[in-house]
Image (cartoon, rainbow, N blue to C red):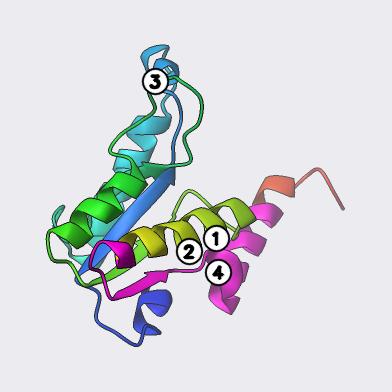
Amino acid sequence: MREGLARLDFASEIVLVSFHGIPKSYVAAGDPYYDQCLETWRLLRERLQLSEEQMPVSFQSRFGLAEWLQPYTDETVKALARKGVRRMAVLTPGFSVDCLETISEIGIENREFFEENGGEKFALIPCLNDSALGMKVIEHLVARELAGWVG
């Protein structure tokens, strides 16, 4: 996360944290996902020493007629640009590896929303699979979870 932000050719005014969404009905039925996302968001803000305003949270990838977790990423990106944010980076901490859906939805579609609404610089920070350190984290987790199962 820090490496990805440090590699930017601009200073981000906002670091948006976007998690994959789920229908609100799942949370109402007891799914802990929403609380886990908010705790991850809190820990990220704490680690980077950013306020909720500097590092807002949102939820992406909704479909169908059901109400999904909010605030929605696309609406958040548009609103921030309309409020005068010109430089934004987006983190997707719910993903350990980059996926085509998120690269397309965040890196392309939301970049376009941002620019169409007045934003100038936009970056999707790559997931853990994009760095040697991140791959070490993934390797450690896989080895830990497979311990005792494979020789």
Q: Amino acid at mark 1?
A: Ile
Name the residue located 35 percent from the left edge and 47 percent from the top edge: 73
- Mark earlier in primary sequence (3, 4): 3
- Mark earlier in primary sequence (2, 4): 2
SS type, badge 4: helix
Q: How many angstroms separate mark 4 from mark 1 (CA)?
A: 18 Å
Relative side of 104 to 32, left or right? right
- Horizontal and vertical percent position of residue 33: 43, 31
Q: Amino acid at mark 3?
A: Val
- Horizontal and vertical percent position of residue 35: 33, 32
Name the residue located 20 percent from the left edge and 52 percent from the top edge: 79
Q: Is residue 5 above or below residue 76?
A: below
Q: Nearer the viewer, mark 3 or mark 2?
A: 2
Q: Which residue is mark 1?
A: 103
Q: How many angstroms separate mark 3 from mark 1 (CA)?
A: 26 Å
Toward the front, the furthest residue is 116
Q: Nearer the viewer, mark 2 or mark 4?
A: 2
* Residue count near mark 3 (Cα–Cα under 10 Å), binned few <14, some 14–19, many ≥20: some
SS type, badge 3: helix
Q: Is residue 113 above or below residue 66?
A: below
* The disc label shown at residue 134, or none: 4
- Horizontal and vertical percent position of residue 127: 52, 64
- Mark earlier in primary sequence (3, 2): 3
* The disc label shown at residue 107, or none: 2
One can see residue 108 in this view:
yes
What span is in magenta? 115-143
SS type, badge 1: helix
Q: How many angstroms separate mark 3 from mark 4 (CA)?
A: 30 Å
Q: Is residue 112 highlighted in magenta?
A: no
Q: Amino acid at mark 4?
A: Gly
